[in-house]
Amino acid sequence: MLTSRPNVSRTALGSGILFSYPEISTIAGVQGLVIYALSSSLPLMVFAFLGPIIRRKCPDGFVLTEWTRQRYGVVTAIYLSSLTLITLFLYMVAELSALQQIINALTGLNGLPAVIVQCTVTTIYTSLGGFRISIITDNVQGAMVVCLIIVGVVAVGVETHIDPSLVEASGLLSSTLLGWQLIYILPVAVLTNDFFISGFWMRTFASKTDRDLIVGTSIATVVVTCILTLVGATGLLAAWTGAWPGDPPQEGSIAFFLLLERLPAWVVGIVLVMTVSLSTAAFDSLQSAMVSTGSNDLFRNKLNFWWIRLAVILIIFPVVVVALKSPSVLQIFLISDLVSASSIPVLVIGLNSNCYWWRGFEVVIGGLGGLLTVFIFGTIYYRNALYGAKLILLENGLYADDWSAFGAFVAAPVGGLLWGLGAFALRIGCQWMLAKFRGRRFDSFDRPSYVATSSIRPGTSLDNEQAPVTGLETLSTKGKFF
């Protein structure tokens, strides 16, 4: 057994948090920071509630795409796997981009050597130890990060001096339009995107019992909330000490590092160690997730495992190239969030046994239609098709002083559901006409047959040596796309 409790907290953290959370503090203030921290941590509890359901429906799986294949068929599984791989690619880019920017900001050195070393080291030990070694390193790195954060907090508390006149003048204690918008945007973005992170699902299935899963995600939620709030608070401190925006004015994304310039050199050293730990823990999990997704979902474990490893190693080269262009870390996350916001709502409908008539065709059309709806909204909002297309990439970021980002994250899930319902009506209509034409009974609304099989009840062990118990419903027929 891999572990008794999932190490979700380390999977949820990466060096990119040193950019995105201080940045939102400098723009939306305390309100934005609290919303962002809670929106990033509370969705982890979804795995405590949905994890047992999916594990009982698909006891032999270890990622979400395995259940998708069982429920919706091969086409939808490949579609979801493709989106998962794209998400993992974007997260790897964001992680390496953040690492090289941090190295450059803290030391003035070129961050490329550090990126190459990290990629090499994580590739070697994940190739030799697989997902198991990733969990072990997560535990070690997580403990190290907690200790370093404690030391860092003490150092900042002792060495930082807040100017009271800047606190009120900054306006960061007041609510803002963006802050209210984030109450909707961030929960939708983070919650749906977590479904694409294979590392979360692997840890969910690796949990020994449902009780351990609940305990593990609960602990992770508290830990992640505390860490993200502390990291994001550096943006507030940078503004209140006069370190940000500086002269000339600097971007809010580097507020954390502007604050560090006022601290002793030994604190910078601690931050470097913390950064490498965070980045390594996140990157090896992304590598393991990409290998598992490619091997299981695309090749059904029929291709030699080392060929998959080689493919992932080759993918790292374009990841490094894109990362070195230093794109906005937050923008990378937002693009991934928009894709997931359009795809996940139509996918999870299938978790409800009463929605047995919902099929893969609706999931695929709904997901793609959600993105098309974002384009349509952007074209109408800006009265320009080019700007509508750019809204899909959120080139203005999350903090544009208008309703474009908010509208995009409304259009994606709502549009996805509407397109999914339209696809459902189209499929039913086609199947009805086909049944009439062939003189067959129209059976699209017939409930699929289910069979009771060996299962694991909530709170019981998933150890294969345990005697099976009944109570699980699994499909006796393969999921249908159309």
Image (cartoon, rainbow, N blue to C red):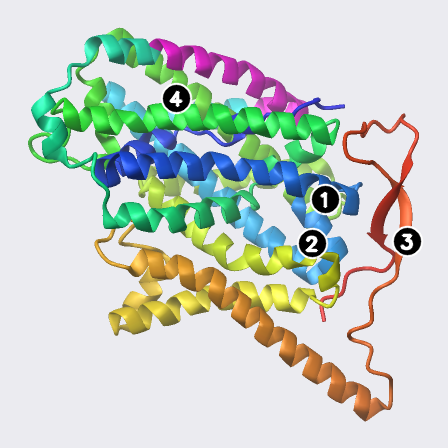
Mark-to-mark CA distance, 4 and 3: 50 Å
User: How far across and down, in percent of the image, does residue 59 sit?
Assistant: 79, 41
Q: Find the residue positioned furthest to the right.
A: 467
Query: On the image, which quarter does residue 243 sit in?
Result: top left
Query: Mark 3 packing: few (<14 Cα in 10 Å), some, or many (20+)?
Result: few
Q: Badge 3 is on which residue? A: 451
Query: Mark 2 packing: few (<14 Cα in 10 Å), some, or many (20+)?
Result: some
Question: How many discs mark residues in the rendered view?
Answer: 4
Q: Badge 2 is on which residue? A: 351
In this rendering, does residue 312 appear at all? yes
The label on residue 306 is none
The label on residue 275 is 4
Q: Type of residue at label 1?
A: Ile
Question: Which callout, 4 or 3, points at the residue further toward the start of the chain?
Answer: 4
Question: Secondary structure under badge 1?
Answer: helix
Q: Mark 2–mark 1 contact, CB under 8 Å?
A: yes
Q: Badge 1 is on which residue? A: 53
Q: Which of labels 4 and 3 is toward the front? A: 3
Question: Secondary structure under badge 4?
Answer: helix
User: How far across and down, in percent of the image, does residue 169 sit?
Assistant: 9, 33
What span is in magenta? Answer: 124-151
Question: Which callout, 1 or 4, points at the residue further toward the start of the chain?
Answer: 1
Q: Is residue 140 rendered to the left or right of residue 407?
A: right
Mark-to-mark CA distance, 1 and 3: 16 Å
The answer to which of 140 and 319 lies nearer the viewer is 140
Whether residue 423 is situated above or below residue 10 in the rendered picture: below
